[in-house]
Image: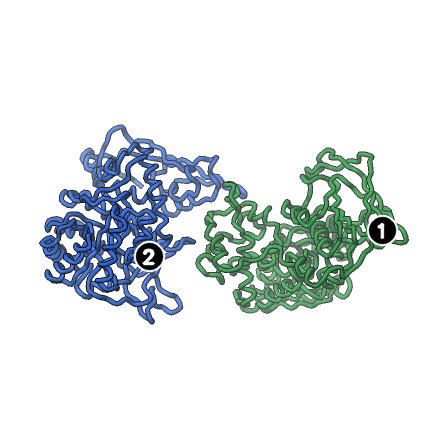
Chain colours: A green, B blue
Amino acid sequence: MSIENNRLTAEQYQQNFSDIHPPFDNREAALVEANRCLFCYDAPCTKSCPTEINIPKFIKQITTDNVKGSAHTIFISNIMGAGCSRVCPVEKLCEGACVYNLLEEPPIPIARLQRYATEQAMEKKWKLFERKPSTGKKVAIVGAGPAGLSCAHVLSREGVDVTIYEKESKGGGLMTYGIAAYKVTPRFCEDEVSYITSIGGIEIKYNHELGKNISLADLQKSYDAVYLGFGVGLARQLDIPGEELPGVVDAISFIYDIRSKGYPQVPVGDRVAVIGMGMTAIDAATQAKRLGAKEVTLVYRRTQSEMPCTEAELDIAKLDGCRIIWLAAPQGIKGTDGKVTQLICRVMKLGEPDASGRCSPVETGETFTLDVDMIIKAAGQIPFEHLVSNSQLQNANGKITIAPNGATNIKGVFAGGDCVNGGKEVVDAVQAGKVGAAAIIDYLLK
Amino acid sequence: MADISANFLGIKSPNPFWLASAPPTDKKINVLRAFEAGWGGVVWKTLGSQVKNVSSRYSAVNYNNTRVMGLNNIELISDRPLEINLREIKECIKLFPDRAMIVSLMADNTREKWHELIAQVEDTGAHGLELNFGCPHGMTERGMGAVVGQDPEIARLVVEWVMEKATIPVITKLTPNVHSVVPTGRASVEAGSNALSLINTIQSVTGIDLDTFVPNPYVAGKSVFGGYCGPAVKPIALKMLATISQDPLTSKVPISGIGGVSTWKDAAEFMLLGATTVQVCTAVMKHGFRIVEDMCEGLNNWMDEKGFKTINDFIGKSVPHLTQWEELDINYHIVANIDQNKCIHCGLCYIACEDASHQSINLDYGKPYNTYTIKEDECVGCNLCKLICPVDNCITMVEHRKGPDYVNWKEYQERGLPLNDH
């Protein structure tokens, strides 16, 4: 047992990381599905989209061969509509609300149709938005992730000049660095950022990190307003013995490496345990398997009813051959010669519902041991608490506190996305960016 | 098992399904395949003087994802030599003596030409003749086809010529490109035509290419009006058929119904409005001869369910149900009802009623599903919501009579009953 990279051939990597939800092969295939759409009024799909894309309208526009109009309908509500069409958990959002579900019929493949329209827009570089005349106002945005880019695009449309400060060398945030490569490729993420910024008036300064080479006070001095969309990032620690052993990694950095270094460079064990059952845990487990791990086991302290990931995500893991152990909480990690060899787990049972309504796991007193050579921790991410507190931002355990319009306790400073909500979907961050931009426009121009 | 055979002026066929005069009936190879598939009869594609077709000749209307809701053609009468057609007709009759063989004719407009053509066709042993007074394109410029059918007096003259010579039953095929098909129908019957068939195709432009700006079908940068047919024309055909069935004179002769018949249900509808046989073309051009299997089986099963022993038991049965608007009962009132257990909350009924009808549906906001209910006092019972609802039997129309008596519009006025006040 060992942790190795370069386990597969180039063809195997290619196959394992190919698009999991391939696009429509051609116009006719898209039209078959688009024409099934009933064109609901006050549509449940739209109401279930955090960005409220007018879904019946964009699908109707596909059927009339007005794909340009369709892409505009999507982007006017969600400038990351292309990326969201690949990463959104649609089964619990738009597609989950599709009225066809109530007829026991397959829902309209909204995401795939959204991809059909937006992909053409990006490939053909359609210029769908024009900037209003310059207002002479300047806004700084921290973080070129979904919240920051969404905010920037709205501001730019309204004639505001935007500078985004991004700590990484690429934009897109977790879309670029934190999502399974079989959903969105790093190349796609770069293209998406370029497409968004092609409207003009948005400059991204890469390798600029708040708290290191820029400060909130400086930004406030140089700009008319500031928007904070720097996300979350620190992996939650397990606080169990052996956690420091080589071979124990966190899912965020594991996925980051896959996306930034290339598949063959990322080492993976023969027998991998992944701790957690959120979307990130699934992304880590499936990609470990796809990098060549022989055996991957997901360990979760509650049951399927309480898991944070969707059924569709769980299915991906199962289809990839990942094993799942429910009601198991890590107790300790053992190793020999400085290498991980075992994960010891407590056997749990469900107790009373907690504040969130989910049943809390309770120890049974029993334990079991898994032989492993690699452990990936995906037990959630925690906010940048020091950064937030040092910037005098009012917060709750590091999550920035905002008014409904995105305003923080500091005048002229707004915030949204994961740094506020602690980590939700890309589409939630896009919506937060729109809300923040609207508040900034109000603040600057009224 | 019901008996679905037809007897049309003594022309017998094992079922009432004939192929209309068109490309599927223009040569032996097709017609034999049609008979093998089970078609009861054919109307052989129109014979006349030699013509030459252009290459590009069809165009279609698609609706949502359904291809060929309507088909348009600019094809002429048969462009094959007359001698070959006559020989093949004879051979087909010999091979399938139990099927109806009608031959469509469009002679040049002289008595002699008609007499000559009729004699040649009767020599084949054909069972009947169909006069093509309906072709709306190409032949009209030569004084034939619809030009004849659009003028009752010209039609009367030509039918008279035909009846002087013909010894087998004559069917006159009517063009729909007129204000009413009845005048030409009456003129034809008065002149001796033994039967009528309708409708021929409807003049149309199916669409325009938005890149080249040339209408369809494209023929070297130009186009012409064509003849429209297929499911799209069925309601128009049914209405025209009904007017022939209602007329005291034209209703006395048998009718062969044509116009968008694709299934046994369509056929039953044409027959309920008075057709003894139906003729099919577009559905076969789209799917091939095999569709006749279900047409026979479906009609048979339906007749069994309804207790009809022969097709004569229901031909024309729906005609008396058509009346004048003035005769309708104003006290008959229906109100929509939405079955909440079946509703899928699509909101289509709501927006249709709100924007296009009587604002009679109530919306209770929900996330993501709204609840829709009928404002019974506001509903006029127009049926729109029921027609639009995508779920079968979710919206039903429930009878709430305004009064127990039958009251038509005339009586309503006489009695001074209240009119709408909003």
Residue A250 position within the rendered picture, expressed as x and y whole percent measured from the top left = 77, 53
- What kind of residue is marked 2? Leu
Q: Which mark is residue B71?
A: 2
Q: Give the mark count.
A: 2
Is residue A401 among what the camera can see?
Answer: no
Q: Residue at x 52, y 41 (%)?
A: A104
Q: Residue at x 23, y 58 (%)?
A: B87
Q: Is residue B26 above or below residue B387?
A: below
Residue in the foreground of this view, choosing between B88 and B23 = B88
Residue B283 position within the rendered picture, expressed as x and y whole percent measured from the top left = 34, 51
Using the image, name the chain to which the residue with label 1 belongs.
A
Label 1 sits on residue: A340
Residue in the foreground of this view, choosing between A227 and B196 = B196
Q: Quadrant of the C terminus of chain B?
A: top left
Cα separation, mark 1 vs mark 2, equals 73 Å
Using the image, name the chain to which the residue with label 2 belongs.
B
Spot the residue most to the bottom. Answer: B220
Determine whether, in the image, residue A314 is placed left or right of residue B374: right
Q: Quadrant of the N terminus of chain B?
A: top left
Helix, strand or loop at disc 1?
strand
Residue A118 position within the rendered picture, expressed as x and y whole percent measured from the top left = 55, 60
Quarter of the figure with residue B301: top left
- Dot 1, crowdedness within 10 Å: few (<14), some or many (≥20)? many
